[in-house]
Amino acid sequence: MPSATRDALQAAMKASLIQGNKERLGVVRMLITEVRNAEINDAKLPGRERTEEEVIALVATYHKNLAKSLAEFPEDRREPIRQEMKLVEEFLPRQLSADEIRAEIETLLRETPERTFGALMKVVSPRFAGRAEGRLVADTLKTSLAAAPTPTAGS
């Protein structure tokens, strides 16, 4: 199944080449390389094309790593990293608000009898990949689990 984000990265690379935008081209090539490396280094199925969710997760991880490195640089050398982060954000979906996350989790809890945090995290993590920070999702799930009524056998 083709990935819209992968296609967007390819189109951005071509456009950056035509426009001569070296900074954007470098960032886009780095993201494409991240996706290709994940495919090549797949332990179970080397060469397997990544799904849209997986591509978004790879781009989100790259963005998160940039954010971490931002804190390590002196203030006068942070601007290039901020610019790179802005370019990477073009390929990420809109970030969900806490209310949107809570609503999706509460819908899931109504639809499933599962009440184990770990099992539910395996379900919700892919849903929110690239659209919300993992810590916020986990905290919201914990809060919602504590407040959710335990489903009865007949419902």
Image (cartoon, helix red, strand yellow):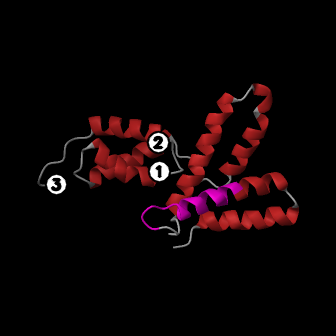
Q: Which residues are magenta?
A: 30-45
Residue farthest along the right direction in this orientation: 20
Q: Secondary structure at mark 3?
A: loop
Q: Secondary structure at mark 1?
A: helix
- Look at label 3 and name its amino acid: Ser
- Look at label 1 and name its amino acid: Phe
Q: Which mark is residue 155?
A: 3
Q: Which mark is residue 128?
A: 1
Kindly identify which residue carries mark 2.
134
One can see residue 8 in this view = yes
* In contact (CB < 8 Å): disc 1 and disc 2: yes
Q: Residue at x 60, y 67 (%)?
A: 4
- Look at label 2 and name its amino acid: Gly
Of badges 1 and 3, the one in the foreground is 1
Is 70 situated left or right of 95 in this image? right
Q: Can residue 39 be found in the magenta stretch?
A: yes
Q: Residues within 10 Å of mark 2 (few under 14, many from 20)?
A: some
Residue 53 appears at what percent x and percent y? 50, 59
Of badges 3 and 2, the one in the foreground is 2
Residue farthest along the bottom direction in this orientation: 1
* In contact (CB < 8 Å): disc 1 and disc 3: no
Among the two numbered marks 1 and 2 on one chain, the one whose residue lies closer to the N terminus? 1
Q: Residue at x 60, y 41 (%)?
A: 65
Q: Which mark is residue 50?
A: none
